[in-house]
Image (spheres, helix red, strand yellow):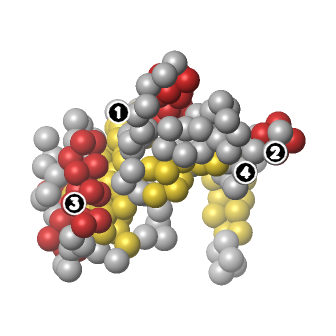
Amino acid sequence: TGEGVRIRLEDGTDIAADVAVIGIGVLPRTGLAEAAGLDVDNGIVVDDRLRTSAPDVYAAGDVALYPDALLGQRRVEHVDHAEKSGEHAGKVMAGADEAYDYTPFFWSDILDAGYEAVGETSSRLDMVEDWKDGQVGTGVVYYLKSGAVRGVLLWNVWDSVDRGRELIAETAKEPVTDPETLRGRIPFG
């Protein structure tokens, strides 16, 4: 009707907008796996070779709950993981005996801005923001749990995903005692 949308928050505040975009994720379609008797838990459970609980049955991509080498058991919904895990499952099915030890990353471009992120980027985690010149526009956001970096968001900072993975691995072994020391660990480029 051209009237837009109005959202009422829990505290009673109303927000009016022309449109609302709601992204809520997906539920993995595991019905076939369940019917076949495979282990399922928010996805098809696989080992580090992407094998399911049934011999010679593999799962990859958004539906696979896999042991991420850096972050533990997780299910990832992004094209990078779908491509890399699918390729890896194919190699294992063809005889390779290699663990899937890749931690996928995410990316998006939004008009003239863009981001890359690796790991867990949840607002439920502790966050340290490091913005170029103190202004939102170019920067790095570190997501932590108990001093361990669990994820890194690179906002208009490019070619630093591997450095993010290194920080996740490094701080898993030696958590930081002062999260503010993370500022500057990944340069703005």
What's the CA distance linking mark 2 and mark 1? 47 Å
Q: Amino acid at mark 4?
A: Val
Binning the other alpha carbons within 10 Å of mark 2 as few (below 14), some (14 to 19) or many (20 upward) gives: few
Residue positioned 29% across, 65% down in the render: 172
Please tell me whether residue 47 is drawn above or below residue 158 in the rendered image.
below
What's the CA distance linking mark 3 and mark 2? 38 Å
The residue where tag 4 is placed is: 40
Q: Earlier in the sequence, mark 2 or mark 1?
A: 2
Name the side, left or right, on which 45 lies relative to 160. Answer: right
**Residue 112: assigned label:** 1
Mark 3: which secondary structure?
helix
Tell how many labels: 4
The residue where tag 3 is placed is: 170
Mark 1: which secondary structure?
loop
Question: Which mark is nearer the camera, 3 or 1?
Answer: 3
Residue positioned 18% across, 65% down in the render: 182
What's the CA distance linking mark 3 and mark 1? 32 Å
The residue where tag 2 is placed is: 37
Mark 2: which secondary structure?
loop
Q: Earlier in the sequence, mark 3 or mark 1?
A: 1
The x and y percentages for residue 138 are 24, 48
